[in-house]
Image (tube, coloured by chain):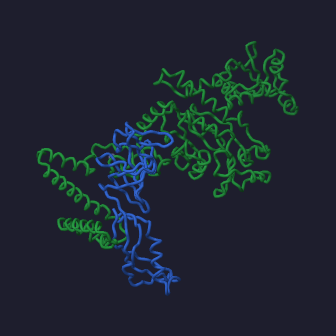
Chain colours: A blue, B green
Amino acid sequence: MFFHIVLERNMQLHPRYFGRNLRDNLVSKLMKDVEGTCSGKHGFVVAITGIENVGKGLIRDGTGFVTFPVKYQCVVFRPFKGEILEAVVTMVNKMGFFAEAGPVQIFVSNHLIPDDMEFQSGDMPNYTTSDGSVKIQKDSEVRLKIIGTRVDATEIFCIGTIKDDFLGVINDPTTT
Amino acid sequence: MSLVTDSPVSSSGSDDFADFLDDHLDAESDNEDDNGEAKDEFASSSSSSSSSEDEWEDDDQPVSKRTKISEVEIVQNGDAAEGSASHVIVEQKLEASSSASVSKNECTHPGSFGKMCIVCGAQVEVSGVSFANIHKEILIGNAEVARLRDTDTKSVLCRKKLYLVLDLDHTLLNSTLLSHMVPEEGYLNNQIDSVQDCQNGSLFRLSFMHMMTKLRPYVHTFLKEASQMFEMYIYTMGDKAYALEMAKLLDPKNEYFHAKVISRDDGAQRHQKSLDMVLGEESAVLILDDTENVWPSHRDNLILMERYHFFASSCRQFGFGCNSLSQLKSDESEHEGALAAVLNVLRRVHHIFFNELADQTGRRDVRQVLKTVRKDILKGCRIVFSRVFPSQFPAESHHLWKMAEKLGATCATEVDPSVTHVVAMDPGTKKSRWALENDKFLVLPRWIEGANYLWQRLPEENFPVKSNEPPKSEAKVKDPDA
Ligand SMILES: [Zn+2]
């Protein structure tokens, strides 16, 4: 799920960045530091959309660095247990398949793939129903349900399932 | 939440949707006081602290569950035909599927991804095999590995295939650092093949890795043919980046290996290779490698390869003073080289396994087949060694003696009419002279090693024992039984 939220961060800036462009420098450093990172609480920071407020700087003794409290708006992405996500399959093997939804890596084990789908190895490994009507392979788009999440410093891992009603392939690259 | 107000709203359709969202979110926060608090807390935020991670999740869980149930109730009320009994069942089902804690008791946690159970999603510590070659976060418990191995082997055998694990360096190719190249190898820079054309090329310069790589002659044909009979893995002591780069050169269309590339970075032990990450039963796996010691538990699966040294640095590394193939501007024979010979062995093993042993499906073992094929090579040969071993050395435990026996020959310590070959370094010994007088083959030890590497009885006339090294043979004629 995406959220548009306000976060706050204490930014340390080297004195050489002071001057007319102080604010610009602060913002570009903030983007570099924050965009693409994850936190367990908020998930993956997709983009900073605006600065709410830059607080008063505090000079650090000894170093000359100045710490500014910055409040900023950003779009974050965080998966939840029970959430339905659409994801693109990146790799299929006999243990199951991996899929990605933006920064989130999802593993769907063969235990959580419907029993009527069987693994087929070969040039393009895939899971296929016995009548061949549904096939999951690399680049397929699937709708899946998240049953577990873990957020690392830079990565988000999820366990997913497609063993439920209305889950599974929504777009097969070979048929379009 | 500001999501709705910030998004540009133009068409009337999205207006409706925005209204719907607004209404829905309002309704939800009206009903759920605690949920509203959670949102405020979220918005006020502090960028560090992951300690409150769970709290947020907990807040979220019951809400979604309640929403679902109330939705079901609406549907149920609309559908008058359904009784109240089924209503209860549906609710219970929802409970079961939406909360992992219910299934926790039954789940055996067969493996983990990102420290979460791959079946129930719970946080778990699984002990087992790390399949880092597939994904660094995948860990599969031993029972599950056994299950996967069993089903995979069955399906592979069903397609009349076996498993083949291939080493890279000195087996399928030879690489050198550019900085280790000698001046005589400079001409190679004019013979580089384009990486875009690896299908046909064999000499590649990988500037970004500061390396040059030469594929062994015949390797393209070898892989193509072998892939018809085997499910193939690459297993190298090189690092991951190198392994993947080499896989690209060998398999540019990604037809053979897919995610079946195992590197040093994936392995558990530093100087050993294991079949843990290979999802085939040991009775269906063959290994091609130039180093026997890295496979302490799988010698019977191993087809030992003669090392391919193309570059000078490779010869130096293994302590050969001689000129390398690159220095001699030469190369291994394409159609009579090691890979062509081994491909024939693979064909024989495959044929015996699936044709001659077709009626013994449960008991077939590729290791036994390999032994049988090997025993055919020098079948009917009876070998006597003449001063090849140190004088006090127990002959039966010498590696050449053992090798000859594995190749199907019988060995003896004394000559008799049944002997067919005398193996010697020096034509002047008593046994060597006996061989010449009695019209028996007199060959160098290299004849046995050659048969071992090339899996065929080589023409004896190519391994004559000559006395063109007088100092050496003099030194040896001290043995009393000469
Ligand atoms: Zn579990």
Q: Is residue A67 visible?
A: yes
Is residue B127 placed above or below A19 in the rendered structure? above
In this view, the residue in front, B430 or B453, is B453
In this view, the residue in front, A75 or B103, is A75
Is residue B277 placed above or below A61 in the rendered structure? above
Q: Is residue B252 left or right of residue B52?
A: right
Residue B472 image-quadrant placement: top right
Q: Is residue B296 visible?
A: no
- Residue located at (60% from left, 38% from top): B224
Q: Position of residue B278 (x, y in %)?
A: 50, 39
Q: Is residue A172 left or right of residue B248?
A: left
Quadrant, the C terminus of chain B: top right
- Residue located at (64% from left, 58% from top): B208
Is residue B56 placed above or below B288 in the rendered structure? below
Q: Is residue B82 left or right of residue B458?
A: left
Q: Residue furthest top?
A: B417
In this view, the residue in front, A144 or A170, is A170
Q: Residue furthest front?
A: B12
Q: Position of residue B185 (x, y in %)?
A: 77, 51
> How many labels were placed on the picture?
0
Quadrant, the N terminus of chain B: bottom left
- Residue located at (86% from left, 32% from top): B469
Q: Residue furthest bottom?
A: A20
Q: Position of residue B326 (x, y in %)?
A: 76, 46
- Residue located at (70% from left, 19% from top): B381
